[in-house]
Amino acid sequence: MEVAVFFPDLDLDVEMTNSQPAEPLAIGDGVTVSWHVPLIKSGDIPKTIEVAFQLAAAVGGGIALNVVANVITDWLMRRFKGRAEKLVIERQEVEFEAGAIKRIVLETITQDTGR
């Protein structure tokens, strides 16, 4: 699942760049995450972080989709709430609110897995 986070917070830029994992990072219940902070900065264009969640182990292992959606939603909220100005999940802009994020994550996982 592809997510883009847009933000004006320079401290977040440094934090995410310095913590960028070499391998996907386990965040719970078979879900891993990796991110990339593009180096290109330009005038009025807000900085972005490209986040990818890997779900194969979780979804293939029979973990409930609701549990997977909670893991992803919680990670995004803890990491970016109050610091991001826009969140895009699978090319769909999402309000930065837990319920809205979880709904889109569940829809995306359901479509991808057919469950």
Image (cartoon, rainbow, N blue to C red):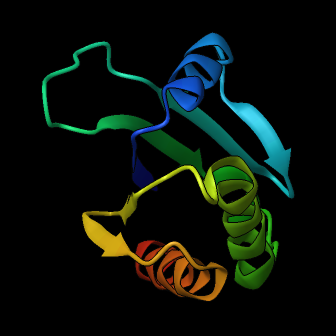
Residue 55: percent from left, percent from top: 63, 55
Residue 109: percent from left, percent from top: 52, 74
Q: Is residue 32 left or right of residue 49?
A: right
Q: Is residue 104 left or right of residue 30?
A: left
Q: Nearer the viewer, residue 77 or 69?
A: 77
Q: Is residue 110 left or right of residue 47?
A: right
Q: Residue at x 68, y 74 (%)?
A: 69
Res 97 → quadrant: bottom right
Q: Residue at x 64, y 22 (%)?
A: 15
Res 34 → quadrant: top right
Residue 6: percent from left, percent from top: 37, 47
Q: Nearer the viewer, residue 99 or 55?
A: 99
* Quarter placement of the C terminus: bottom right
Q: Residue at x 82, y 72 (%)?
A: 63
Give the vertical position of 62 relative to 34 (above or below).
Answer: below
Residue lying furthest right: 29
Residue 113: percent from left, percent from top: 50, 75
Q: Residue at x 70, y 80 (%)?
A: 65
